[in-house]
Image: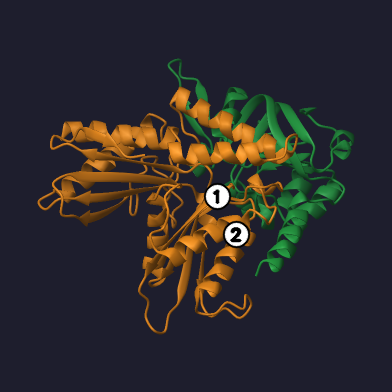
Chain colours: A orange, B green
Amino acid sequence: MNLLSDSLLELVRRTSTEIPEDVHQAILSSLEREKKGTIAESAMKIIDQNIALARNKSQPICQDTGSIIFYVDCPIGFDQAAFEQTAQDAVKLATRKGYLRQNSVDPITGKNDGTNVGPGSPMVHFHQHDSPEARVRLVLKGGGCENVGAQYSLPNENLQANRDLDGCRKAILDAVLQAQGKGCGPGILGVCIGGDRATGYEFSKQQLLRKLDDRNPAPELDRLEQDIVETANKLGIGPMGFGGKTTLLGAKIGVLNRLPASYFVSISYMCWAFRRQGMTLAKDGSVQQWLY
Amino acid sequence: MIPLKTPISKAAISRLKVGDEVAITGVLFTGRDAVHKYLHEGGQLPPGVNLKDGLLYHCGPVVIKDEEGKWKCVAAGPTTSIREEPYQWQVIRDLGLRGVIGKGGMGEKTLEACKKYGCAYLHAIGGAAQVLAQCIQRVPNVYLMDKFGAPEAIWEFEVVNFPAVVTMDAHGNSLHKEVFAASQAELAKHL
């Protein structure tokens, strides 16, 4: 179990301090695209410097180290309670080491006990799978981008959005417009069409586990993903909302069945400081392979 | 980059216009959600926090104690400013702020207060916690730590060449308003 502690601490450290390669590539192309001498280009340059500094100093990319969300795919017989305890201890240690900010607050008393462990923190989603190995993925999602997430219930008369893919497109693009630079763009969208209010948001976040350069296997969703990014990048919102060419670095869309009465489009906005990492574990709890 | 040194005169703020890039040197005090609500409800600033002609930074940093027991800031990017919109105009008026540093921009009431009292909104790069922490040379003090916890406390930072962009100036101009209107008009063409 000791090896699992070390692995989880290292997972938190990497996630907080190192941007995944697919995201870095998207940021570099965006830096290329911005017009030279603009404040948008200047913002992207600072972002690129920041990525290098965080990695070299092993310090958080962003001071808001966010909600701590673990996704665990585990084999039959995996001890989930023990895992959760070890994850909590790793989070406490990572906080003491400064990889995570003291970021978890009781909403009633306003008390921040400084450990990052409490109701809902860290969040661990377990999923049993038919494979002998355990896979652990971690997303750290800051509050600025979480606050600009949005959930639409279709039809929406204001947006003239009906219960079809065009209606979904209108809702998603409205979320981009409303977010402007407040979620630390250029951003990445995770979207869920369908589900209920809770599962819709939850599944929209899970879309963020996909790599930016992958393609959606469903052709109509793939088209919508490409279209959302292309259209958003014509709006001129740009990095930080300063105006410019890159408003989104990516959009990933998943679908859940809905009730006949409900039609939700749930959008999670992820900032450019997209912190996700994952690992597969060997039987002894050591890291077998890094995933991103 | 236009150098900006604290304390800042009203005249120096007046010269800034939307789109200018500035490099700030001097003292910053952080203050975010809890501090704004506290001030709004009549709370007093502790002795040592002087914001007259100064800069308030919307930031909840990661600060640790080094081997000598001194504060060391390891991450310090801006937080989203719009949450302080109900309170900011009053804080600008009462404390005599010359600048608010944050991200994402603010609304009409703050823009109005910037014009009326001689203040500007300086947009730091959101998420650039390392680049910005590197500009912090020293953390002389922290205030209201026990009351609000580390991210919400008032931290005093001595900074050198801290980069920001003027996105709301003292003349009633807001880049955020412009970009919103332009992007809304553009979106209408694509629906």
Residue B175 position (above or below residue B65): below
Residue carrying label 1: A187
Query: Residue A70: percent from the left, percent from the top?
Result: 31, 48
From the viewer's perspective, tell me whether residue A33 is left or right of residue B62: right
| Residue in the picture at 43% in, 80% down | A262
Query: Residue A291: percent from the left, percent from the top?
Result: 32, 40
Chain assignment, label 2: A
Residue A286 position (above or below residue B169): above
| Residue in the picture at 62% in, 54% down | B83
Residue B153 sits in quarter: top right
* Quadrant position of the N terminus of chain A in the picture: top left
Q: Are marks 2 and 1 in contact (CB under 8 Å)?
A: yes
Front residue (pair B137, A168): A168
Q: Within 10 Å of the Cα at label 2, are there few (<14), some (14-19), or many (20+) other Cα atoms?
A: many
**Rounded to the nearest whole Å, what is the CA distance between mark 2 and mark 1?**
9 Å
The residue sitting at the top extreme is B68
Dot 2 amino acid type: Val
| Residue in the picture at 79% in, 39% down | B98
Q: Which element is circle 1 on?
A: strand
Q: Earlier in the sequence, mark 2 or mark 1?
A: 2
Dot 1 amino acid type: Gly
Residue carrying label 2: A176
Front residue (pair A213, B58): A213
Chain assignment, label 1: A
From the viewer's perspective, tell me whether residue A211 is left or right of residue A87: right
Front residue (pair A167, A153): A167
Q: Which mark is residue A136?
A: none
Residue B25 sits in quarter: top right
Query: Residue B97: percent from the left, percent from the top?
Result: 76, 41
Front residue (pair A93, B155): A93
